[in-house]
Image (cartoon, rainbow, N blue to C red):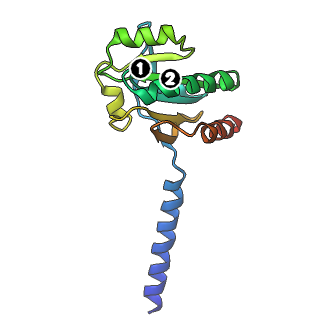
């Protein structure tokens, strides 16, 4: 009986350890190449060193368009502290619409077009927009939002991540 209890205790301890590890929520951001509107490229490796919001969106997405002023305000609030934003337009979004949106709304951050859908695929097969990821300075995804984030909660998390070494 003692052997069974000892074995059960080991299993519980291991499961708890795995739960704590998985519960930390940080997983490496997938290796991706983002093609920006100006034709230049940015890779996932380029995200390291900053806290970065990676926002998958579309010009045809009402929620995306509605949240964009808050995404801009968040970028403006934290950019001087080591925060960045990368808006990734979905493959079905006509490039001319994306360019027009970025110019008319004066988006202050980098905008990429995922022409092939490979970036959305790599980032968890993103199909719903907006889908937003918060990436820490080590290049790890710490939070995923489907739909518009709670911006007050998002700001608290950004501040916490910016304070990390």
Q: Which residue is nearer to you in this view: 8 or 110?
A: 110
- Horizontal placement of 154 versus 87: left or right? right
Name the quarter where the N terminus is drawn: bottom left
- Horizontal placement of 29 versus 109: left or right? left
Circle 1 SS class: strand
Please report whichever mark, 2 or 1, sits nearer to the chain's N-terminal start: 1
Residue 76, image x and y in percent?
65, 21
Circle 2 SS class: strand
Q: Residues within 10 Å of mark 2 (few under 14, many from 20)?
A: many
Which residue is identified by label 2?
86
Q: Nearer the viewer, mark 2 or mark 1?
A: 2
Residue 148, image x and y in percent?
49, 36
Q: Is residue 47 above or below residue 158?
A: above
Which residue is identified by label 1?
34
Q: Residue at x 48, y 61 (%)?
A: 18
**For residue 123, which quarter of the picture?**
top left
Q: Residue at x 48, y 83 (%)?
A: 6
């Amino acid at each position: 009986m003692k052997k069974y209890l000892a074995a059960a205790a080991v299993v519980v301890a291991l499961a708890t350890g795995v739960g704590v590890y998985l519960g930390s929520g940080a997983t490496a951001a997938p290796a991706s190449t983002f093609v920006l509107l100006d034709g230049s490229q940015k890779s996932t490796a380029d995200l390291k060193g900053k806290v970065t919001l990676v926002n998958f969106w579309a010009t045809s997405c009402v929620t995306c368009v509605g949240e964009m002023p808050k995404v801009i305000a968040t970028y403006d609030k934290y950019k001087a502290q080591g925060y960045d934003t990368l808006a990734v337009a979905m493959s079905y979004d006509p490039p001319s619409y994306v360019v027009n949106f970025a110019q008319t709304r004066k988006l202050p951050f980098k905008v990429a077009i995922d022409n092939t859908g490979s970036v959305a695929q790599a980032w968890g097969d993103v199909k719903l927009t907006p889908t937003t990821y918060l990436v820490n300075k080590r290049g790890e995804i710490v939070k995923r939002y489907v739909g518009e984030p709670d911006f007050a909660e998002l700001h608290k998390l950004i501040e916490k991540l910016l304070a990390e070494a």
